Amino acid sequence: DEQYDPQALQAKWQQRWERLEPYRAGEDPADERPRRYMLDMFPYPSGDLHMGHGEVFAIGDVVARYWFLRGYNVLHPIGWDSFGLPAENAAIKRNEHPATWTYANIETQANSFRRYGISFDWSRRLHTSDPDYYRWNQWLFTRFFERGLAYRKGGLVNWCPNDQTVLANEQVVNGRCERCGAEVVRRELTQWYFKITDYAQRLLDDMDQLTHWPERLLTMQRNWIGRSEGADVLFEIEGRDEPVTVYTTRPDTLYGATFFVVAADAALADEIVTDEQRPAFEAYRAEVAKLSDIERLATDKEKTGVFLGRHAINPVNGERIPVWAADYVLSDYGHGAIMAVPAHDQRDLDFALKFGLPVKVVVHTGLADPAETGQATPGEGTLVNSGPLDGLGKAEAIAKIVEILAAEGRGRATVNFRLRDWLLSRQRFWGTPIPIIHCPDCGEVPVPDEDLPVTLPDMRGEALAPKGVSPLAAAEDWVNVACPKCGGAAKRDTDTMDTFVDSSWYFLRYTSPGYSEGPFDPEQVRRWGPIDQYVGGIEHAVLHLLYSRFFTKVLHDMGMVNFTEPFVRMLNQGQVINGGKAMSKSLGNGVDLGKQIDEFGVDAVRLTMIFAGPPEDDIDWADVSPAASQKFLARAFRVMAEAGAAGAPGADFAAGDIELRKVTHRTIDEVTRLIESYRFNVAVARMMELTTAARRAIDSGPGAADPAVREAAETLAIMLSLVAPYAAEEGWERLGHGPSIARATWPEADPSLLVQETVTCVVQVAGKVRDRLEVSPDITEDDLRALALASDKVRAHLSGDPRKVIVRAPKLVNIVP
Ligand code: ANZ
Ligand code: ZN
């Protein structure tokens, strides 16, 4: 029977794979095969797998399967990121324990993954909500705490009023909660932080190693870290003993500072406001508290502020300048206060014009007076009205003023980062308890390692409802403990960790999932790390991907890992959309992965995902055709089945039809290069061409029994297994091989069969043909232009550079001298 029946194949091969476990990573230390660690971002168990998962894992599997077939020892693990809010919300609604929903969903997803045929090593499966896993979150937290990298401080934090918990800066997207979309407000709270700012410079510097990361991703991280060079300048404030420091990137404009602004919510504003101005200030501060950072920083926002009744002294010329409070200065950036230079900073100018403050030009740029036009002139120019700086350019002026300030002890050059410390405590239940005991006498005492894990108490349903403090606080038996240091009455910390802690090191645990001496076996990490290929969404650019880089560096400093960057190559897949729009409940344009599979089969769905375009591009499901993919697979399957029926393995390919052999070997050569350069969709197109060529050879050529047909069919089976594993397995078996195509070897192209095809390119100069070049049909425009201009016959007709070169690759170059 040569009918392609996807559902029957799925049932048959899923069982076989379960029995054979063909994708288990080799554990033998004597195994000398080169290694590859392939990773896809692990899923969150919210219901069954969706189309987005379908895409990520289909992409990751192409590369993983490719390296298996190349004879590498491949580690391709899977696990679940299984702590988090949705489980807790479901538990409240259903009056259950969050584990019930979580582990049921994990089982559903695991079954779907098995059906989806991903080449995982199932033996290394992990769930971050298992005490066996989160124990090591606690162990790592304790190590961070000992190193001063985990600490508690009070301050303004982002608070989601809906989820009733704090959020890290990275989890606030456009002023809204990354999870639920509610508008985030600011609250004064004492919270735990990881000191990621200690690593800001290294997080930047080590990007040099990330040569295989998408540029877009690096730019996002660079901007998030936000390094700027400038100076700290000290201003005296009348009536205050201590001077106040401001951070500026333009110390050269110091003579143009005409007023001074303190963030309305900074302690300094409250401290220095005069009695007379206090009522106005407090009313204003209450208004500002309602705003998000995004709103505060918006350049088009009408400027607001209050005079604080005091004056600061400009350190370079002794001028008295008024001190204001405003919202456009943020309390947690720089020093929360600025010198305002309205002539050269737009926000300062908007503010000055609104409140009638003076505007003083100190950089001559050749542009019109900002006070007249309302346009600040932030660019470079020559310093004027600036005493010793007059006549200098920006760079010299900055150097000189910093030197002067430093000599007088009134300033110094500094570097500033936008990156803030990572706020990691959460007032929710379904996460890793923070392993700290608060003792009235000893303070913050870490739970001793031998007492880990601190497991979650048994709580469910209503008890988990958000109330602004952690639900754990209500579990009195759990909370009240003896201090590990003095034995006195003490209390456990009741917050849980941000679940991004869990995902910051899970990739290390996969190398030794059962290890009990530590979070991972350093030996195994040395063996497998760093990750050769990581596939996942761009939405993690400044979240998981930044945190994981930070964790890796800390672990490196602790001597536990031997590299400083965890992910060598990063691939951000596009989204699966429908009808040009992201799938959403409100639009009703959702596509269900399970239903697509029921209708077209796993192979066709996977092939459709891969064939739709380059992996980074979005896939519009309205524009693709799984039905057409299924048809192609049926054709490919028939070729394999017919070739299988007509002969046996071991044929002498050299005796086969030479034309078909050339197609086969060209396909091998191209597909190999296409896979290695991540052009998977083009690779599939080449497989389709090979199928057509083999079909033609069977029908109107040498026939199915020709060794070249077998060669083409075997090649097709192996290549197709990267995207359509079921059809490929069955085809491979029909061709007389077994027990699994996982054990096959990637074919190698025979160079003698790779006849380079060329086309003739005509080169014209002033409309006359001057040369003919034999070039590759896929030569680039640039290469062709260079080739044409290098031709002696062409140069003989050119004196100097041509005025214009029109290139129509590969066939024509037209030169206008
Ligand atoms: C005077 C000045 C003159 C400035 C000028 C700019 C242009 P980046 O590059 O992002 O680090 N600034 C400093 N602290 C601030 C805060 N807490 N909130 C809001 N703005 C703050 O930006 C540094 C510049 O942003 C600083 O340089 C300061 O304004 C402002 F022609 O100082 B500048
Ligand atoms: Zn104590």
Image (cartoon, grey):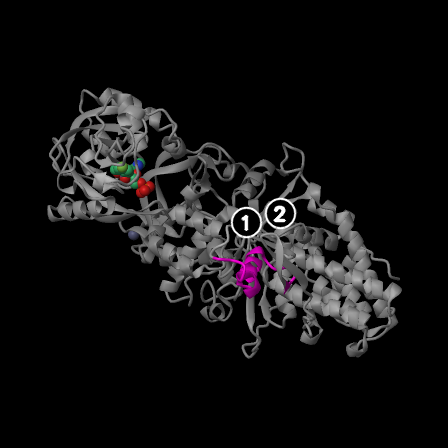
Residue 478 screen position, x and y as percent: 43, 47
Residue stretch in magenta: 773-799
Q: CA distance from mark 1 to mark 2?
A: 9 Å
Q: Residue at x 36, y 64 (%)?
A: 558
Residue 52: give its label: 2
Residue at 44% in and 49% down: 219
Q: Which mark is residue 283?
A: none
Residue 457 makes an appearance in the image = no
Q: Is residue 493 above or below residue 550?
A: above
Disc 1: residue Cβ within 8 A of ligand 1's nearest atom: no
SS at mark 1 in the image: loop
Q: Say which of 67 and 165 sits in front.
A: 67
The stretch drawn in magenta includes residue 324: no
Q: Earlier in the sequence, mark 1 or mark 2?
A: 2
Badge 2: residue crowd in 10 Å (few <14, some 14–19, many ≥20): many
Circles 1 and 2 in contact, beta carbons < 8 Å: yes
Q: On the image, numbered disc 1 is attached to which residue?
A: 537
Mark 1 residue crowding within 10 angstroms, few (<14) / some (14–19) / many (20+): some
- The image shows residue 354 at horizontal and vertical percentages of 29, 22
Name which quarter of the figure residue 380 lies in. Answer: top left
The reply, left or right, for residue 277 in relation to residue 208 is left
**Residue 698 spot, x, y in % from top left:** 86, 66
Is residue 785 rendered magenta in the image? yes
Residue type indicated by callout 2: Gly
Task: Tell me which image quadrant ligand 1 sits in.
Answer: top left
Q: Which residue type does callout 1 highlight?
A: Gly
Q: Is 70 on the left or on the right of 800, as rendered?
A: right
Q: Nearer the viewer, residue 355 or 790?
A: 790
Secondary element under disc 2, as helix, strand or loop, is helix
Q: Is residue 74 rendered to the left or right of residue 214? A: right
User: Would you identify the image quadrant in which residue 647 lies?
Assistant: bottom right
